[in-house]
Amino acid sequence: MNDTQLAAYFGYAEKIGRAVAYYGLGLIFFAFGLYKFTPEEAAAIEPLLIHSPFLSWLHAGFGAQGASNVIGVVELAIALAIFARRFLPRAAAIGCLGAAGSLVVTVSFLFTTPGISEDTAGFLIKDVLLFGIAMWAAGEAWAMARSGARSPAALARSA
């Protein structure tokens, strides 16, 4: 295999990786947003919410299920904005920044929740990587919005 062929394969790998990272972020927010409407998820996040300096007011104002529902609506809105990248790249950029902010809050649970279990801590630590993806995706979507490109490939061609 020569360098030109290898470059083509790695180019495909980059395109696949970009799409999986970007739309995977949206899928995670969509799936977890839907899950927030279940009693099981409301009960699971309640200990995280009541100790959070950012979200304890939600629990105090709406109770466990109400707070979980509000978070679910926000997560679904973030997911829909992310999915709209091709048609509304500015909205996607804002959605990605919303995802990044949400992920900062969830990582903060590691420091604000007393007696957090190893399982919960392990689950939350993945949000550090997702934060990086969200920030990268916000930058890419914003660049698309500013250039008028409708895809990352078109953005690359215009650079």
Image (cartoon, rainbow, N blue to C red):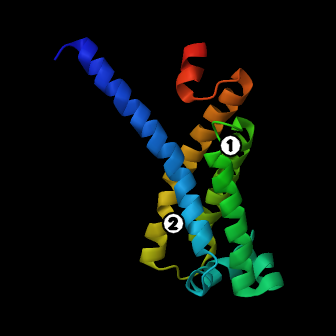
156 or 102: nearer the eye? 156
What x and y, as percent, mark residue 109? Answer: 61, 70
Secondary structure under tag 1 reads helix
Left or right of residue 66, residue 43 in this image: left
Residue extending farthest to the right is: 61
How many tags in the picture? 2
What x and y, as percent, mark residue 48? Answer: 62, 78
Quadrant in which the N terminus is drawn? top left
Q: Image quadrant of residue 94? A: top right
Left or right of residue 128, residue 53 in this image: right
Q: Check disc 1 and give the amino acid type.
A: Ala
Q: Residues within 10 Å of mark 2 (few under 14, many from 20)?
A: some
Q: Which mark is residue 76?
A: none
Q: Is residue 13 above or below residue 128?
A: above
Q: Is residue 102 above or below residue 132?
A: below
> Which callout, 2 or 1, points to the residue nearer the camera?
1
Quadrant in which the C terminus is drawn? top right
Q: For mark 2, what is the residue? A: 124
Instruction: Specify whether residue 76 is in view.
Output: yes
Q: Image quadrant of residue 103? A: bottom right
Q: In terms of sequence position, does the residue under pointer 2 or pointer 1 come before the other? A: 1
Q: Residue at coordinates 57% horizontally, 21% vertically from top-left?
A: 154
Instruction: Specify whether residue 159 is in view.
Output: no
Left or right of residue 19, residue 29 in this image: right
Q: Image quadrant of residue 93? A: top right
49 or 70: nearer the eye? 70
What x and y, as percent, mark residue 158? Answer: 61, 14
Q: For mark 1, what is the residue? A: 92
In space, the residues marked 2 and 1 are separated at their CA atoms by 24 Å
Q: Is residue 94 above or below residue 153?
A: below
What x and y, as percent, mark residue 156? Answer: 55, 20
